[in-house]
Image (cartoon, rainbow, N blue to C red):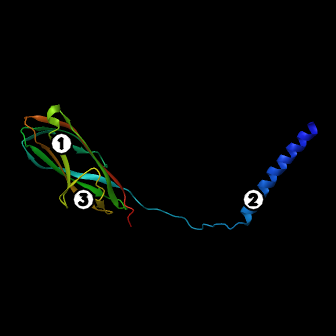
Amino acid sequence: MQKSKIYIIFGVLSLVISLVAISLAYAGFSSTLNVNSGAASNSKWDVHFSNLKLDMKEDVIIKDNPSIKYLTTVIEGGNITFNNPHSYISYTFEAENNGTLDALLNGLLISRPLCDNLEECNNVSVKIYDVASNTELISTDNSKLISETGRRTYQLVLSYEGESSDITLNDISIVFNYVQDNSY
């Protein structure tokens, strides 16, 4: 019985060694791919917002303007009070591409600002317009290309169409998501 175990172990070990040897021989005789050069990429991704400026306002008190989060495509913050119905405020800002890759707007997120009067909060509108085409952007808009070293100007409009007075907005949040343009 013990001799048969030794023969079985020896047979299995021989089979494994044979398979490894055959695999190595096949790999050695197969055609090989020689890569004699390397790939280098000098690509740079740098898409961010800049130049957020107050554009127009009517019947609005500004305690704190929204601001651009440094070197991102995020606008956040702010404390704005609408004094009357039909009050509004608008800002212009630029999406700037200082990189070497074309950037395509892939998504847009506009969070509803916090309001001190929850019932009237539904009467607050936050919209973004592409200044060049004078069209409103929506969250699924993916057609705004910024070529390398280019820029696009947008307008952020906050308006109030309710019946009350003195509605205060806090924590405005807008995020653009850009991706590399692979359409070429």
Label 1 Cα crowd, 10 Å radius (few <14 / some 14-19 / many 20+):
some
Who is closer to the viewer here, 70 or 156?
156
Quarter that holds the C terminus: bottom left
At which x and y percent is residue 180?
Answer: 38, 58
The amino acid beneath tag 3 is Arg
Q: Which residue type carries mark 2?
A: Leu
Circle nearer the N terminus (1, 2): 2
* Number of marks in picture: 3
Which of marks 2 and 3 precedes in the sequence?
2
Reply above or below: 11 against 131: above
Residue position marked by numbered label 3 in the rendering: 152
Which quarter of the figure has residue 133? bottom left
Secondary element type, mark 3: strand
Q: Is residue 176 left or right of residue 34?
A: left
Amino acid identity at mark 1: Asn
Q: Which quarter of the figure has residue 1? A: top right
Q: Which mark is residue 24?
A: 2
Which type of secondary structure does the marked residue at label 2 adopt?
A: helix
Label 1 with label 2: CB-CB less than 8 Å = no
Say which residue label 1 marks. Answer: 65
- Marks 1/2: CA distance? 69 Å
Given residues 120 and 116, the one toward you in this image is 120
- Horizontally, residue 114 falls left or right of residue 34, namely left
Instruction: Tell me if 98 is positioned left or right of 6 in this view.
Output: left
Callout in the foreground (1, 2): 2
Q: Position of residue 44 (x, y in %)?
A: 39, 58
**Of 64 and 178, the residue lying toward us:** 178
Give the alpha-carbon distance from disc 1 to disc 3, as whole Å: 21 Å
**Horizontal and vertical percent for residue 142?**
31, 56
